[in-house]
């Protein structure tokens, strides 16, 4: 395959950025999208041009480190037949001769560090605000002390599969991190262990979400459509229900 | 060549030092040792803990769990990771499950049985005392994780489900679909972020450890490179913990994440920490094969697939190009079922892997031929793949039942290969997966440098020569939540140690040498990319120090590695600057350390003239071609001491004494 890439190049957080065009020949359809970028970087290195910086790690779709906007959709969701992370997108999804646009996540809460690399620390701050159950090591009761109904447990799991990649934020016209936040809220709200802090948690996490610079949710649904782990929009509904319910409780502010 | 000459050939690569006879495990019956150690350990008054700083490198199960736990205890923790968030550590990719001796199934499980299975699975090359403790604390891990909100699989009654895993006879594996590692890591990450919020843990992401600081014989700090600004700076504490994972990426292609590296461990090794059993690496049989020269990593599929899939290759090499569905039954060789009628496709990982290699070496592999070097160093192309066929299972159980059991794995395979595994047999091939070797530690998980602790995959301690399935997560969390937080107090009780600042000669030297190394990498300005060297190193290691090793090959490998290292320092091309986000520079630094480790791995493999677990020496096999141990000569841990670049390492043997378990030969026929 021969492809033409138009890639966002930006030297640093405060440097101006621009799309640069590169031609790449001998691309195999068996290559993953990131292997194609590796190939480009080898070519650039040979030409004494600095390679394109991009985040990636496990390349198995589970660590959440990779993520770029491809042809306008996060992780190239609209180039793929199934929900995907960037690392699991393969070149067979593109036509020979394709022109492919590659850009970083664009959101107020995720400033660009360099090229396609962005800063997602805002997600960690949302979790710090309450995305946990307060239990010190060693103080846990026996695992079977509290049964958890299977249906709720499965729902907790579905939400706990969030990989924190940030595609939801990149896809949202408001730059909202609500799908991410609601996945954690729903995960912990569905388990008996998550009940004592439930009201406190939702108030604190929503406040941290807003403070981190994410936009508000207006129920557009772009987030869920690109989510590689298929976190449903209904999780935001769960968050809203919990938030309203929490206003009638004294926990937190 | 006589036996004596053989010995001389190996021994010319190293010298022998003092044996290690005291791993600091307390005396007494094995089931009392851990309690005794906990009781005898010196403690630190809760009010004094905030005056003590622990440097923790890594945020996976072993690092994240320990950082959170030490933070809860009140210590001041500085935690570092190379990723952009602690939640991305590679523990996240573990699929299968976590073992624990809960005996919830009422199926004869116990601490004793988990202990026994782990020692046997490690082919009798693990230290009894550490493994017993691992089995002992395994049950607490499940309790802790459930309390944190880890959504383990449950039965309709609301209690936890378990399954059988890794060829043992009890159902002790707890799991969260095929994403157990992810769920356990998120649990540890949440506990960690709670401590970040509480101010006990200071998190430094996108920071890579590039040097260890040793002052007056104690580990007192590290040097990191800020991967965004390029700043090289020292950090000081009263103890240092490395929870930095395994070194499988020395093979270039492995199931490890792209960033997994040995740099932290290797830097510590160079400063005096012994490296234990570096040649013990695990090759996992059910991975998706290499597709071509541009492959960057390999993907593992859970070995549960072997429960219903049948593994075969064509009997005739001429059939290897054909559509597998057109190859009639009588022309197929179900080689595992043929060679091991009792265990069939369920033989342990090391055996399944080696037999796949054998049939491909015979020219009967399937799929695209990939470039490699043969044992004489000549380039060749070989098909590296065998079929994993579900057509029988689909016929017997129906497509829906197969989809219910393995659907997520089939989807993953389809997404990566573009082939539909319900229609055509999957192709699989072994890939490097886990490092049983690692920095040598004592019973307290302290390395040979006082104040330097090593946890999880980064240490050598619990899996001997082969790791059982679902045991890596168990060890990471055991070390992180329960072992280290109980043993490190004993050391910290002697602190706080005298304050040091960046002007201290040892600290200044560490910073300067780290920066000098970075500058040197950038100044070569050669003609070859970092990856081209890494691929070449991987090719050497895979051919000579992979699934099968022999003396001539290992000696060849050592020569080739030395040559390659020289070429690297003369001809590598690292673009960009030091004071910037520079991924080529990051990879170059890691590769430089991998190239030094690679030689030590080969020396270790060369000196161990026996086959055990994942280490198969072709000279040491039974008449049937199975691994043959030599307990009289090699029942010891090889702990290697660094003596300088190009100088021979010193071998310290730690004899393995089996007081509670009888040594036996494994058999699966």
Image: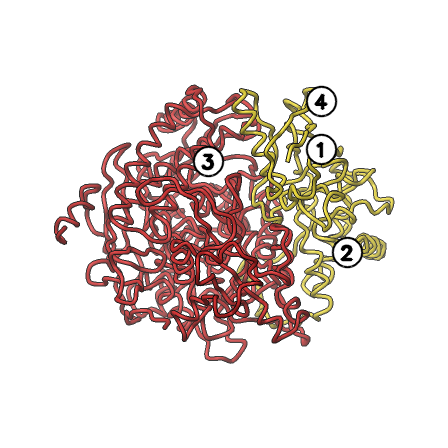
Q: Is residue B180 left or right of residue A221?
A: left
The chain carrying label 1 is A
Q: Looking at the picture, tell me which residue is in the foreground, B603 or B552.
A: B552
Q: Is residue B68 left or right of residue B132?
A: right
Q: Which mark is residue B209?
A: 3
Chain with colour yellow in the figure: A
Q: Are marks 4 and 3 in contact (CB under 8 Å)?
A: no
- Which is more N-terminal, label 2 or label 4? 4
Which residue in the protein does label 1 denote? A100
At numbered mark 2, what does the secondary structure look like: helix, strand or loop? helix
Neighbourhood count class around disc 4 (C-alpha, 10 Å): few under 14, some 14–19, many 20 upward: some
Which residue in the protein does label 4 denote? A18
Q: CA distance from mark 4 to mark 2?
A: 45 Å
Tint applied to chain B in the drawing? red
Q: Are marks 4 and 1 in contact (CB under 8 Å)?
A: no
Q: Looking at the picture, tell me which residue is in the foreground, B336 or B130.
A: B336
Which mark is nearer the camera, 3 or 1? 1
At numbered mark 3, what does the secondary structure look like: helix, strand or loop? strand
At numbered mark 4, what does the secondary structure look like: helix, strand or loop? strand
Which mark is nearer the camera, 4 or 1? 1
The chain carrying label 4 is A
Q: Are marks 1 and 2 in contact (CB under 8 Å)?
A: no
Q: CA distance from mark 3 to mark 1?
A: 36 Å
Which mark is nearer the camera, 1 or 2? 1
Q: CA distance from mark 4 to mark 1?
A: 15 Å
Q: Position of residue B626 (x, y in %)?
A: 31, 64
Neighbourhood count class around disc 2 (C-alpha, 10 Å): few under 14, some 14–19, many 20 upward: many
Q: Kindly identify the residue that appears in the image at 44 percent across and 20 percent down.
A: B525
Which mark is nearer the camera, 4 or 2? 4
Q: Looking at the picture, tell me which residue is in the foreground, B459 or B68.
A: B459
Which mark is nearer the camera, 2 or 3? 3
């Amino acid at each position: 395959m021969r492809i033409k890439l138009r890639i966002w190049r930006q030297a640093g957080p405060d440097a101006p950025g621009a799309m640069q065009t590169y031609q790449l020949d001998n691309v195999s359809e068996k290559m993953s999208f990131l292997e194609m970028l590796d190939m480009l970087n080898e070519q650039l290195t040979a030409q004494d041009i600095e390679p394109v910086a991009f985040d990636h790690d496990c390349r198995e779709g589970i660590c959440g480190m990779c993520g770029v906007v491809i042809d306008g959709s996060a992780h190239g969701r609209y180039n793929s037949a199934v929900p995907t992370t960037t690392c699991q997108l393969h070149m067979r999804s593109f036509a020979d001769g394709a022109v492919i646009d590659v850009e970083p996540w664009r959101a107020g809460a995720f400033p660009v560090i360099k090229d396609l690399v962005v800063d997602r620390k805002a997600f960690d701050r949302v979790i710090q605000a309450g995305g946990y159950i307060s239990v010190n090591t060693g103080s846990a009761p026996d695992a079977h002390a509290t049964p958890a109904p299977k249906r709720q447990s499965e729902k907790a799991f579905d939400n706990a599969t969030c990989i924190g990649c940030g595609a939801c934020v990149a896809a949202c016209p408001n730059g909202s991190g609500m799908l991410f936040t609601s996945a954690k809220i729903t995960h912990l709200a569905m388990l008996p262990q998550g009940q004592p802090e439930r009201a406190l948690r939702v108030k604190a996490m929503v406040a941290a979400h807003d403070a981190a610079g994410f936009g508000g949710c207006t129920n557009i649904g772009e987030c869920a459509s690109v989510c590689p782990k298929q976190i449903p929009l209904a999780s935001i509904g769960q968050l809203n229900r919990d938030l309203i319910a929490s206003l009638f409780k004294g926990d937190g502010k | 060549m006589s036996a004596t000459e053989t010995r001389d050939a190996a021994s010319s690569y190293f010298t022998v030092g003092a044996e290690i006879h005291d791993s600091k495990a307390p005396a007494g019956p094995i089931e009392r040792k851990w309690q005794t150690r906990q009781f005898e350990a010196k403690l630190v008054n809760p009010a004094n803990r905030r005056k003590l700083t622990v440097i923790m490198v890594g945020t996976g199960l072993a690092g994240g769990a320990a950082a959170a736990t030490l933070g809860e205890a009140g210590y001041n923790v500085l935690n570092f990771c190379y990723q952009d968030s602690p939640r991305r550590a590679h523990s996240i990719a573990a699929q299968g499950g976590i073992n624990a001796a809960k005996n919830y199934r009422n199926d004869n499980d116990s601490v004793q049985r988990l202990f026994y299975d782990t020692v046997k699975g490690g082919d009798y090359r693990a230290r009894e005392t550490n493994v017993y403790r691992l089995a002992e604390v395994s049950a607490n891990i499940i309790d802790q994780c459930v309390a944190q909100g880890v959504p383990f699989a449950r039965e309709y009654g609301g209690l936890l489900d378990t399954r059988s895993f890794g060829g043992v006879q009890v159902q002790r594996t707890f799991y969260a679909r095929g994403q157990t590692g992810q769920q356990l890591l998120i649990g540890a990450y949440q506990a960690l972020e709670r401590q970040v919020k509480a101010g006990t843990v200071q998190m430094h992401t996108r920071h890579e450890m590039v040097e260890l600081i040793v002052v007056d014989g104690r580990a007192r700090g590290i040097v990191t490179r800020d991967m965004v600004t390029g700043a090289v700076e020292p950090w000081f504490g009263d103890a240092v913990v490395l929870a930095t994972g395994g070194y499988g990426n020395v093979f270039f292609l492995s199931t490890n994440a792209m960033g997994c590296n040995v740099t932290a461990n290797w830097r510590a090794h160079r400063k005096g920490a012994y490296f234990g059993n570096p040649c013990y690496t695990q090759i996992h049989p059910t991975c998706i094969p290499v597709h071509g020269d541009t492959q960057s990593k390999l993907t593992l599929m859970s070995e549960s697939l072997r429960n219903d899939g049948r593994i075969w290759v064509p009997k005739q090499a001429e059939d290897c190009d054909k559509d597998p569905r057109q190859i009639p039954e009588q022309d197929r060789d179900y080689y595992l079922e043929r060679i091991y009628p009792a265990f069939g496709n369920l033989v342990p990982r090391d055996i399944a892997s080696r037999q796949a290699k054998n049939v491909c070496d015979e020219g009967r592999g399937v799929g695209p031929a990939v470039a490699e070097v043969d044992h004489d160093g000549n380039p060749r192309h070989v098909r590296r793949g065998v079929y994993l066929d579900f057509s029988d299972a689909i016929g017997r159980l129906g497509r829906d039942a197969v989809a219910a059991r393995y659907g997520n794995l089939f989807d993953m395979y389809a997404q990566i290969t573009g082939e539909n595994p319900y229609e055509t047999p999957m192709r699989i091939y072994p890939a490097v997966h886990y490092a049983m070797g690692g920095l040598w530690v004592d019973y307290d998980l302290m390395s040979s440098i006082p104040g330097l602790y090593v946890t999880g995959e980064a240490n050598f301690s619990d899996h001997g020569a082969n790791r059982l399935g679902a045991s890596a997560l168990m060890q990471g969390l055991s070390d992180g939540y329960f072992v280290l937080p109980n043993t490190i107090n004993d050391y910290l009780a002697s602190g706080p140690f005298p304050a040091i600042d960046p002007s201290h000669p040892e600290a200044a030297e560490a910073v300067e040498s780290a920066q000098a190394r970075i500058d040197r990498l950038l100044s070569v300005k050669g003609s070859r990319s970092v990856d081209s060297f890494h691929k070449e190193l991987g090719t050497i290691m895979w051919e000579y120090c992979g699934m099968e090793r022999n003396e001539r090959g290992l000696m060849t490998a050592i020569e080739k590695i030395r040559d390659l290292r020289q070429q690297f320092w003369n001809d590598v091309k690292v673009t960009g600057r030091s004071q910037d986000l520079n991924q080529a520079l990051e990879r170059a630094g890691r590769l430089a350390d991998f190239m030094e480790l690679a030689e030590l791995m080969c020396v270790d493999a060369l000196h161990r003239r026996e086959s055990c677990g994942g280490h198969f020496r072709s000279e040491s096999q039974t008449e049937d071609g199975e691994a043959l141990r030599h307990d009289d000569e090699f029942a010891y841990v090889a702990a290697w001491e660094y003596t300088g670049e190009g100088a021979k390492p010193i071998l310290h043997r730690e004899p393995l004494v089996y007081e509670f378990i009888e040594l036996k030969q494994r058999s699966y026929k």
